[in-house]
Amino acid sequence: MKSFAELEPREILALAISLEEEHGRIYGEYAEGLSESFPASANVFAEMAEEENEHRRWLIDLFRRKFGQHIPLIRRQDVKGFVTHEPIWMARPLGLEKVRQQAEAIEYETRQFYERALERATDTDIRKLLGDLAAAEAQHVSLAQKLGETHLTKDARAEEAEVQRRMFVLQIVQPGLAGLMDGSVSTLAPLFAAAFATHSSWETFLVGMAAAIGAGVSMGFAEALSDDGSLTGRGRPLMRGIITGAMTTFGGVFHTLPYLLTDFKTATTLAIAVVLIELWMIAWIRARYMDTRFMRAAFEVVVGGLIVFGVGVFIGSFGGGH
């Protein structure tokens, strides 16, 4: 993968063409999926799809004039800093609110991309087109307002409050939840393997703390180095890394603390209870902020956690510290 700063003008235009084509197809899928239940909103997305296609044609014409007929295939997944969007357009029936949220995120990311590209462009024609596209994105009537006029009037929020909530989820909740899930689940196997292998509260506590802190450092660095946040609006890498690392460590430490009790059976019983509380808490956070149904989130998180717990118990049963 390349970073955005490494892209040449030819590659930036090729990436812009790919993004506009992808977004046009996504909005077309939105329009088709919403046409039966929300025809007015489907028309909004159909218009947006056509607008994205028009932008793509502008970009292709400019590319051909500047760089010839061959357009290299450069996609969002080839460049650091882009968010991978969940393919919700494949699900039926489509939920209007979830579609609206994803489209807002796409519009925001695209505007950031054109503004960054404009800063780097030196060619007059390229700067003009990028500036026009950035202005077009900035001047769009917000999708929330468009859909609110037809379906969300009673529930519409002020645009500033909505943007603030989106950024809170993107910059705080998502990295924190990723860390909490990793810390809570990944440390189960080493913790309970040590517990059932040694039957020693103190030795289990040491293993759990080492696993939690090690996972926190690893996840923190991985998140901080994943992208610089300039295109996605995900915030500063250092802050994301700290949040992810801290929540990863917290997730592992929380069910390790019971092993400060000297009685091994009591400590293990309490640790198992804490694990169940953690898993249900993660499921609730996913349902609350990530637009996932609670029962689905609970199934994914709890079942996954129990499998890892079982692996730890199974491996620990081969220990010789009885």
Image: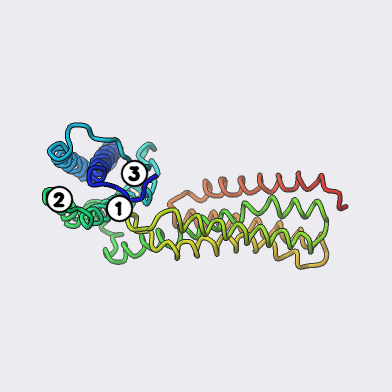
Of the residues shown, which amino acid type is indicated by label 1?
Glu
| Residue matched to label 3 | 76
Query: Is the N terminus in the top left, top right, bottom left or bottom right quadrant?
Result: top left
N-terminal label among 3 and 1: 3
Q: Position of residue 38 (x, y in %)?
A: 27, 43
Picture layout, residue 156 above or below residue 65: below
Q: Residue at x 29, y 37 (%)?
A: 29
> Within 10 Å of the Cα at label 1, are there few (<14), some (14-19), or many (20+) other Cα atoms?
many
Q: Position of residue 197 (x, y in %)?
A: 81, 51
Q: Secondary structure at mark 2?
A: loop
Picture layout, residue 157 above or below residue 189: below
| Residue matched to label 1 | 109
> Within 10 Å of the Cα at label 3, are there few (<14), some (14-19), or many (20+) other Cα atoms?
some
N-terminal label among 2 and 1: 1
| Residue matched to label 2 | 123
Q: Residue at x 32, y 50 (%)?
A: 6
Residue 207 vs residue 321: left or right?
A: left
- Of residue 49 and residue 183, the one placed in the foreground of this image is 183
Give the residue furthest to the top.
Answer: 69
- Of residue 3 and residue 295, the one placed in the foreground of this image is 3
Q: Residue at x 48, y 54 (%)?
A: 287
